[in-house]
Image (cartoon, rainbow, N blue to C red):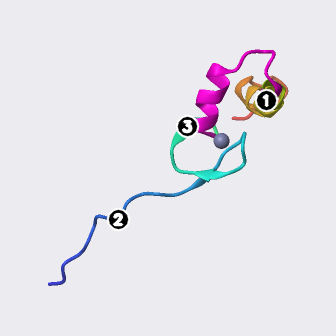
Amino acid sequence: MGSFISAKKQDSLQECLICEEEKNKGIHLLNYFICENCETDIVKSDTGDQGYELYVNRLKKVKNALIPNKKNNVQ
Ligand SMILES: [Zn+2]
């Protein structure tokens, strides 16, 4: 009987929607992934920040996904 090492971590990197870097910690919004850093940045951002506009633009993708499209009556 062989000894199986099952300590294999699930460290599947995912590309962050905001910074486009591959991270393994973060949050999921449907099919989208936002890394820990960006999530924190967004929370901390004020509307006057330079980065904010970028975040908003990126997050529009998520927003579109979150809002159900009535035309797409998928069964
Ligand atoms: Zn990120």
Which mark is on residue 9?
A: none
Residue 50: in magenta span: yes
Picture layout, residue 65 above or below residue 49: below
Judge by depth and name the residue closer to the eye, 17 or 54.
Answer: 54
Left or right side of 5 for 63: right
Q: Earlier in the sequence, mark 1 or mark 2?
A: 2
Residue 63, quarter of the rendered image? top right
- Secondary structure of the residue carrying tag 3 is helix
The residue at the point 71 percent across, 42 percent down is 17
Q: Looking at numbered disc 3 in the image, what kind of residue is underneath it?
A: Glu
Picture layout, residue 37 above or below residue 50: below
Picture layout, residue 17 above or below residue 61: below
- Ligand 1 within 8 Å of disc 3? The answer is yes
Q: Earlier in the sequence, mark 2 or mark 3?
A: 2
Residue 52, quarter of the rendered image? top right
Picture layout, residue 72 above or below residue 14: above
Q: Looking at numbered disc 2 in the image, what kind of residue is underneath it?
A: Lys
Residue 18: horizontal and vertical position, in percent?
Answer: 72, 39
Q: Nearer the viewer, mark 2 or mark 3?
A: 3
Q: Looking at numbered disc 1 in the image, what kind of residue is underneath it?
A: Gly
Q: Which residue is mark 2?
A: 8
Q: Which residues are magenta?
A: 33-51
Q: Which residue is mark 1?
A: 51
Q: Nearer the viewer, mark 3 or mark 1?
A: 1
Q: Which residue is mark 3?
A: 36
Asked if one can make out residue 73 in the rendered structure from this viewpoint, the answer is: no
